Amino acid sequence: MDYAHDIKQFIFAEFLPGVAAEQLGDDYDLVANGVIDSLGLLRVVTWLEGHFNIPMDEVDISERDFVSVAAICRFVERAEGLSVLETAHGGANNDRA
């Protein structure tokens, strides 16, 4: 699934109103370029949790997962993969270190 469109729409609506989504490359560093700060990261995480049904308390999260649209897409793919695996195996794996 291509998550980039939805993620870009959210980024532009929340952080770059008035700028066209086509103007943002998927690898543009959102954090280093000041588009998203620490509070913005919380907004992104909250939106991802609701929009993609990602159980954030069961997923390892790092700031590097949110530096660009491409990184956020990879995070969502990884998180959804974990969610599918946990469902297939009867729930979350509580043996994590």
Image (cartoon, rainbow, N blue to C red):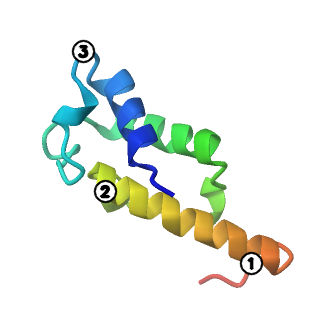
Report the Cα–Cα distance between label 1 and label 2: 29 Å
In the drawing, does residue 21 fall left or right of residue 57? left
Q: Quadrant of the C terminus?
A: bottom right
Report the Cα–Cα distance between label 3 and label 2: 21 Å
- Mark positioned earlier in the residue sequence (1 or 2): 2
Residue extending furthest toward the right: 90
Q: Which mark is residue 70?
A: 2
- Mark positioned earlier in the residue sequence (3 or 2): 3
Residue at x 60% of width, y 71% of height: 81
In the drawing, does residue 70 fall left or right of residue 7? left
| Amino acid type for the residue under numbered disc 1 | Asn
Q: Secondary structure at mark 2?
A: helix
Depth order, front residue of 39/27: 27
Residue at x 21% of width, y 21% of height: 19
Sort mark 3 into few (<14), some (14-19) or many (20+) by Cα contacts within 10 Å. few
Q: Secondary structure at mark 1?
A: loop
Q: Which mark is residue 30?
A: none
- Mark positioned earlier in the residue sequence (1 or 3): 3
x and y percentages locating residue 86 in the rendered image: 74, 74
Question: Does 73 sit above or below residue 47?
Answer: below
| Amino acid type for the residue under numbered disc 2 | Ala
- Do the residues under discs 3 and 2 have CB atoms within 8 angstroms? no
Q: Which mark is residue 94?
A: 1
Using the rendered view, name the quadrant where residue 9 is placed. top left
x and y percentages locating residue 65 in the rendered image: 36, 59
Sort mark 1 into few (<14), some (14-19) or many (20+) by Cα contacts within 10 Å. few
Question: Does 9 sit above or below residue 66?
Answer: above
In the drawing, does residue 33 fall left or right of residue 60? left
- Reading the image, the residue beneath label 3 is 18
| Amino acid type for the residue under numbered disc 3 | Gly
